[in-house]
Amino acid sequence: MIRRIALSSLLVFCVAGASASQAVADRGASHVAGTYAVSDFGTTTCDPLGATRLVCRTAGLRIDYDGDLAGVSTSGFEQVIDCARGRTVGRGSETFTGSVNGVGGTLTWQLVFVSDFDCASFFPSDLRIVAVPTEGGGGLAGTHGVLLFGDTDYTGVLG
């Protein structure tokens, strides 16, 4: 049930993200792309959720960005890991400090994600994240749009 809700939320978020992306592009926003790498995995705590599932909460995950987003962010999220299926779904928020296409400030986005998950190594792969900015500060105040993330790269439209 939780998996269905999370996947439904991801689908709605993706459709909304695609619509938002077109609307933002129509208002003169710009395309952004680049790479990212996790530099600190933060702290994760997990609780069993049935025989083969876990609910995990991560705080303080640090991410370094290169490309059109240049800076660092801190993320926190909750996910449900299904070891029998090798999948995870989750949601959270991330606060970025740096610049977007040379404009500096802070930007917070809400995100939902789904990925394959290896419970033996406790590591995701084939990660798909959709993120929508909800708050900005400095030169990034009022920023809106959508970001799409893979395992090591991102693309999107921000304005």
Image (spheres, helix red, strand yellow):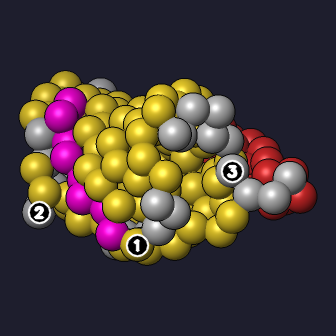
Quickly name the residue at label 1.
67
In magenta stretch: residue 10: no
Task: Point out residue 125 in the picture as x, y percentages from the top left corner.
Answer: 33, 69
Q: Amino acid at mark 2?
A: Ser
Query: Whole-percent x and y of residue 117?
Result: 30, 60
Spatial separation of the CA atoms under disc 3 and disc 1:
16 Å
Q: Callout 1, which amino acid? A: Gly
Residue 54: name its quadrant: top left
Question: Residue 119, relative to residue 48: is it above or below?
Answer: below
Q: Secondary structure at mark 2?
A: loop
Q: Could you tell me which secondary element the residue under label 1 belongs to?
A: strand
| Structural distance between the alpha carbons of marks 2 and 3 | 38 Å
| Residue receiving disc 3 | 159
Q: Residue at x 65, y 54 (%)?
A: 158
Pick the residue in front: 143 or 109: 143
Callout 3 environment at 10 Å: few (<14), some (14 to 19), or many (20+)?
A: some
Image location of residue 60, percent across then percent down: 18, 34
Residue occupying the point 48% across, 29% down: 137
Magenta stretch in the rendered image: 59-66
Q: Which mark is residue 121?
A: 2
CA distance separating discs 2 and 1: 29 Å
Q: Does the magenta stretch mainly form a helix, a strand or a loop?
A: strand
- Name above or below for residue 25 compared with residue 11: below
Nearer mark to the viewer, of 2 and 1: 1
Viewer can see residue 144 = yes
Residue 109 visible (yes or no) = no
Q: Earlier in the sequence, mark 2 or mark 1?
A: 1
Label 1 crowd bin: few (<14), some (14–19), many (20+), radius 10 Å: some
